[in-house]
Image (tube, rainbow, N blue to C red):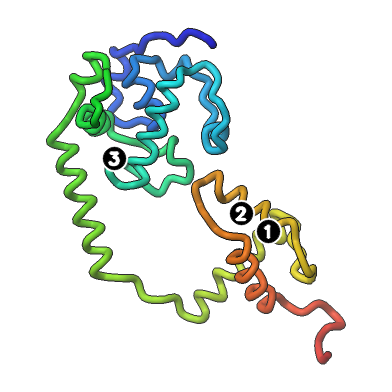
Amino acid sequence: MADNKSANWNIWGNVPELPLWEAVALSLDIEPRSIQFNPNNWATRQKIDGVTEEFEDRLLVAERNRLGGKLPSQDRNYGTPVLGHVNLGIFAAWALQLTPRWQVPERFAALSNEEAFTAAIAAAQEKSTAATKSPEKPLGTRERETLLKLVIGMAIDGYGYDPSANRSDVIPEICRNLATHHITVSDDTLRKYLNEASKLLPQKPGKSGM
């Protein structure tokens, strides 16, 4: 395993927002630019070359807290969580309140902004409460049909899905690919919607009037 360089705090102390994995590296005093980080390897839980086990452990904790709303972030709906951006001062404050507390370099701890962290948590809770009180209206028929057309169109064009086939190996493949982005959809659920969507496809020549 390659040795990682110490973080250049003259640079990172002046970077207010950065990807989650870079913030985790800084919490270990690791220079993020010394890591050959591949988010696809992380998504599929493959071993990341050139980093310590502690880096992977911390990244897992940070990722799950971010998804769970306990670590405020700038873009929670980012497709790949470890690439989503966090405010470094808020991230440092979050890291310092963990139990057991992370051992971090002094320059990292000095960036902690507890006031901003507390305010961000409060804002997230308020937003969540407001969303609970004001549920979205259910999709109308036209909107639902449009979404179904989008799903089956991407399945056909991107995966070679055949709507006329009795069974398809494409469905498990799509579900596995979704899982790498932390989107859980069962084979049966996807199959149900694709079957429903297939009824909206234009009929092939020679099929009409049958």
Q: Earlier in the sequence, mark 1 or mark 3?
A: 3
**Of helix, strand and loop, which one carries label 3?**
loop
Residue 199 lies left or right of residue 179; in this view the side is right
Residue position for label 3: 71
Q: Amino acid at mark 2?
A: Cys
Count neighbours of disc 1 (C-alpha within 10 A) and say few if under 14, some if 14 to 19, many if 20 or more.
some
- Quadrant occupied by the C terminus: bottom right
Which x, y percent locates residue 96?
A: 21, 27
Which x, y percent locates residue 66?
A: 34, 41
Q: Relative to 192, say whether 95 is above or below.
A: above
Which x, y percent locates residue 26?
A: 34, 20
Residue at x 83%, y 83% (from the top left corner): 207
Q: Earlier in the sequence, mark 3 or mark 2?
A: 3
Count neighbours of disc 3 (C-alpha within 10 A) and say few if under 14, some if 14 to 19, many if 20 or more.
many
Q: Relative to 7, say whether 156 is above or below.
A: below
The front one of 55 and 142 is: 55
**Of helix, strand and loop, which one carries label 2?**
helix
Residue at x 56%, y 76% (from the top left corner): 145
Residue, far right: 206
How far, Cα to Cα, is label 3 from label 2? 28 Å
How far, Cα to Cα, is label 2 from label 1? 6 Å
Q: Relative to 193, say whether 81 is above or below.
A: above
**Of helix, strand and loop, which one carries label 1?**
helix
Residue position for label 2: 175
Residue position for label 1: 171
The front one of 108 and 11 is: 108
Count neighbours of disc 2 (C-alpha within 10 A) and say few if under 14, some if 14 to 19, many if 20 or more.
some
Q: Amino acid at mark 1?
A: Ile
Residue at x 68%, y 51% (from the top left corner): 173
What is the number of callouts on the image?
A: 3
Q: Amino acid at mark 3?
A: Leu
Contact? badges 2 and 1 (CB < 8 Å): yes
